[in-house]
C-alpha cells in the first residue's frame, strides 16, 4: 500500500512538473510573440512620416461619417470578409481602361481598412508607367519601388506613412520606367511580394496596378497576388472593353467589381455585365469635398 502511495505521489509530482513546463513554454512563446510584435512596431515606425493636408479636398476619406465613407466601409467589409475566408492578404486593383478611379479606390479602400484597429495596410503603387499615389496625397516621393527593383535601395528608406493616418504605409512607385512589365514579373518583385505576404500576417497589401487593356503589366504581375478587384466607371467603361478584360483575366482570381462614378447610390446600373463577383456600387459622384 505504502509503495502504491509513493508511486502515486511520484506520478503527481511528475504531472505538476510537466504542467509547469507547458506553462513556461507557452509563456515564453507569448513573450516571443510580444517581442516579434515589438520588432514589427519598430520596423513600422521606421517608415518616414510625410505631412499631408486637406485630404478631403483630394477626395481621400478621413474619419468623417457620411455616405461616401459609409460606401467605402461597405466595400471594406465585403473585401475583408472574402479575404479572411480564403486566408488571403494580397489584393490587386485594376480596371479595363485607365481613368476609372483605380488609384482613388485603392487609396480610399486602404484608408478605410487602416481605420480598423487590428489591421494594417501597405498600399503599393505598382503603376510603374504612370505613378500617382504620392501625387494623390499631395507630395512627390523621393524614392519608390523602381529604386528598390533597379538599384537595391532598402525598403526602409522608401516606405512612407501619411502623417496622422495610423496603420497605413505607402510604397510609392518611384520614377516612371518603360520596361515595367519585366520589372513587375521579375524574381525580385515576386520575392518582395512573398515577403510582404508573410512578414505581417495581419496586414493587407493593396497593389494599385495599371489598366488591363493598356499594357501587359497587370497580367504579368497578377500571378503574384491572391486576387483582383476590378474598378468600373459608370458611363465610362465600355461593355466591350470590360468583356475583353474579363476574358484576359481568366485563370486569375477576381474578388469582385466596384462601380465607381455611380450616378446615384440606388440606381441599378444599366447595361454593363459586371460578373463575376459583383461587390459594390460606389458612389454617388465624389464631389470636390467628400
Ligand atoms: N467617384 C469619383 N468622383 C469624383 N472624382 C473621382 C472619382 N473617382 C476618381 N475620381 C478622380 O478622377 C481622377 C482619375 O482617378 P484615378 O483614381 O487617378 O484613376 P485611375 O487610377 O484609374 O487612372 C482623379 O482626379 C480622381 O480623384
Ligand atoms: Mg492610377
Image: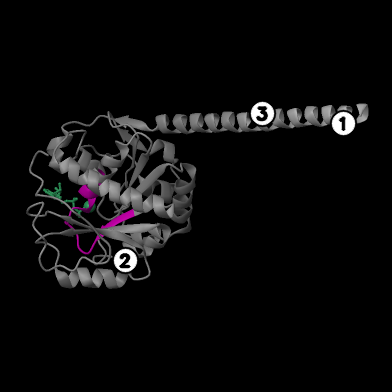
Percent position of residue 232, x then y: 18, 60
Q: Nearer the viewer, residue 141 or 122?
A: 122
How many numbered discs sit on the rendered protein?
A: 3
Percent position of residue 69, x then y: 18, 41
Left/right placement of residue 179 relative to residue 27 reads left
The reply to whether callout 1 and callout 2 are in contact (CB within 8 Å) is: no
Q: Nearer the viewer, residue 100 or 172?
A: 100
Q: What is the magenta range?
A: 92-107
Left/right placement of residue 17 relative to residue 103 reads right
Q: Is residue 61 magenta?
A: no
Frontmost of labels 1 and 2 is 1
Q: Nearer the viewer, residue 189 or 111?
A: 111
Q: Is residue 184 above or below residue 245?
A: above
Q: Which residue is mark 2?
A: 216
**Real-space Cα separation, disc 3 to disc 1, in angstroms:** 26 Å
**Real-space Cα separation, disc 1 to disc 2, in angstroms:** 74 Å
* Quadrant in the rendering for residue 271: bottom left
Q: Residue at x 66, y 28 (%)?
A: 24
Sequence-wise, the earlier of marks 3 and 2 is 3
Q: Which residue is mark 1?
A: 7
Q: Which residue is mark 3?
A: 24
Q: Quadrant of the N terminus?
A: top right
Sequence-wise, the earlier of marks 3 and 1 is 1
Q: Is residue 244 above or below residue 287?
A: below
Q: Secondary structure at mark 3?
A: helix
Percent position of residue 58, x then y: 15, 39
Q: Secondary structure at mark 1?
A: helix
Amino acid at each position: 500500500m505504502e509503495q502504491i502511495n509513493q508511486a502515486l505521489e511520484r506520478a503527481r509530482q511528475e504531472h505538476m512538473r510537466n504542467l509547469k513546463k507547458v506553462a513556461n513554454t507557452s509563456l515564453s512563446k507569448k513573450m516571443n510573440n510580444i517581442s516579434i510584435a515589438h520588432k514589427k512596431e519598430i520596423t513600422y515606425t521606421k517608415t518616414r512620416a510625410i505631412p499631408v493636408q486637406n485630404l478631403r479636398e483630394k477626395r481621400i476619406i478621413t474619419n468623417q461619417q457620411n455616405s461616401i465613407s459609409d460606401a467605402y466601409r461597405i466595400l471594406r467589409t465585403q473585401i475583408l470578409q472574402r479575404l479572411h475566408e480564403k486566408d488571403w492578404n494580397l489584393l490587386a486593383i485594376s480596371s479595363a481602361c485607365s481613368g476609372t478611379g483605380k488609384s482613388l479606390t485603392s487609396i480610399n479602400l486602404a484608408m478605410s481598412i487602416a481605420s480598423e484597429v487590428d489591421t494594417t495596410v501597405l498600399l503599393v503603387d505598382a503603376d510603374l508607367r504612370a505613378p500617382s499615389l504620392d501625387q494623390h496625397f499631395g507630395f512627390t516621393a523621393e524614392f519608390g519601388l523602381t529604386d528598390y527593383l533597379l538599384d537595391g535601395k532598402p525598403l526602409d528608406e522608401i516606405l512612407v506613412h501619411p502623417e496622422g493616418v495610423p496603420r497605413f504605409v505607402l510604397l510609392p512607385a518611384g520614377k516612371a520606367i518603360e520596361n515595367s512589365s519585366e520589372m513587375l514579373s521579375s524574381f525580385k518583385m515576386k520575392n518582395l511580394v512573398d515577403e510582404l505576404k508573410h512578414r505581417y500576417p495581419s496586414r493587407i497589401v493593396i497593389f494599385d496596378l495599371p489598366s488591363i487593356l493598356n499594357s501587359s503589366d497587370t497580367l504579368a504581375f497578377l500571378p503574384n497576388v491572391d486576387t483582383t478587384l476590378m474598378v468600373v466607371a459608370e458611363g465610362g467603361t465600355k461593355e466591350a472593353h470590360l468583356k475583353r478584360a474579363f476574358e484576359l483575366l481568366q485563370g486569375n482570381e477576381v474578388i469582385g467589381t466596384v462601380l465607381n462614378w455611380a450616378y446615384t447610390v440606388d440606381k441599378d446600373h444599366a447595361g454593363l455585365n459586371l460578373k463575376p463577383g459583383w461587390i459594390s456600387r460606389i458612389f454617388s459622384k465624389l464631389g470636390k469635398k467628400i
